[in-house]
Every structure is written in C-alpha cells, then in structure tokens.
Image (cartoon, rainbow, N blue to C red):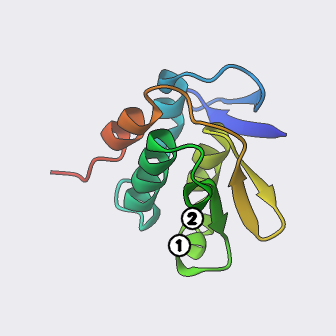
Amino acid sequence: MSVLILGGNGAPASMDAASTVNSSVVASVAAQVPKTSAAAPLLVKIVQNLERDPSNEKFRSINLEGKAGAKLVSEPAAMTLLATVGFETQGSRLVASGAPPAGAAAAVARALAPPA
C-alpha cells in the first residue's frame, strides 16, 4: 500500500506504509487536513483513542458508510492521515494494523487545533 504525502514544499513523495513513520511525519500529513474540516476533530479523537488503547477493537475499526466515515471519506487528506497512522481499507471499513507511532496523537492534536 502506498500513501501520498505532500512535503513542506508541496511536492508529493510516495511512502510505503510499512516504512518507519514518526510523529513528525504524522504532523506533516495532518497539516494537510483543513483545520475547519468536519473531519479534523474526529481525526484527533480517533488517533488519541488508538494510541491510548491500541488493542481495543472499538478503536481499531471505522465504518466508512456511517456518519463518521462519511466525514473522513469526504476529506482526502484525512484518509491519507489515517493510512499514515496504520489504518488500512478492508471493504467498507478502515482497520488499524497496529498502534500508531509514538506521539502521533499529540502531533495530530497540535496540527489540527482549531484556529484562534
């Protein structure tokens, strides 16, 4: 699986999901999500929950056909962020393949903090 990541200069770079991802990569990808997007607060909560309790099945799967899933699907950068922290599409669901990188939740929360 490949993930499209836009670097600081806006140039796309392909990254294999199996590669080592750290919180700075997560922050860079999260910065691509508009802070005013309906997906932004949802992404913060999803990554926080997964980081806090990665073995909890409730936090490891997202129904893309539900209300939350619709918000995520409507924002391509949100889907890229979820892939970056370890979610993979399986049918109509996103399923986490493991725990997100250490510090991912804080990086996402900082990048998506509502505008003042």
Q: Are marks 1 and 2 in contact (CB under 8 Å)?
A: yes
For residue 15, say whether it is visible.
yes
Q: Residue at x 57, y 35 (%)?
A: 100
**Observer able to see residue 8:** no
Which residue in the structure is indicated by mark 1? 68
The circle on residue 106 is none
Q: Residues within 10 Å of mark 2 (few under 14, many from 20)?
A: many
Q: Residue at x 58, y 45 (%)?
A: 81
User: Residue 35 occupies which quadrant of the picture?
Assistant: bottom left
Instruction: Check disc 1: other Cα within 10 Å, few if <14, some if 14-19, many if 20+.
Output: some
Residue 108 located left or right of residue 8: left
User: What's under tag 2, amino acid-wise?
Assistant: Leu
The one nearer the camera, 12 or 60, is: 60
Q: For the N terminus, which image quadrant?
A: top right
Helix, strand or loop under label 2: helix
Mark 1 vs mark 2: give the one in front: 1
Q: How many circles with numbers are drawn on the protein?
A: 2
Residue 45 in the image: state x and y as whole percent: 41, 55
**Where is residue 109 drawn, in percent x and y?**
34, 42
- Residue 96: image x %, image y %? 68, 48
Q: Is residue 102 above or below residue 96?
A: above
- Label 1 and label 2: CA atoms lie apart by 6 Å
- The answer to which of 32 and 85 lies nearer the viewer is 85
**At 67% across and 38% down in the image, what residue appears?**
98
Front residue of 19 and 34: 19
Residue 106 horizontal side relative to residue 61, left or right: left
Q: Residue at x 78, y 57 (%)?
A: 89
Q: Residue 72 bears which disc, if any?
A: 2
Quarter of the view holding residue 14: top right
Query: Relative to 98, does residue 18 appear above or below in the rendering?
Result: above
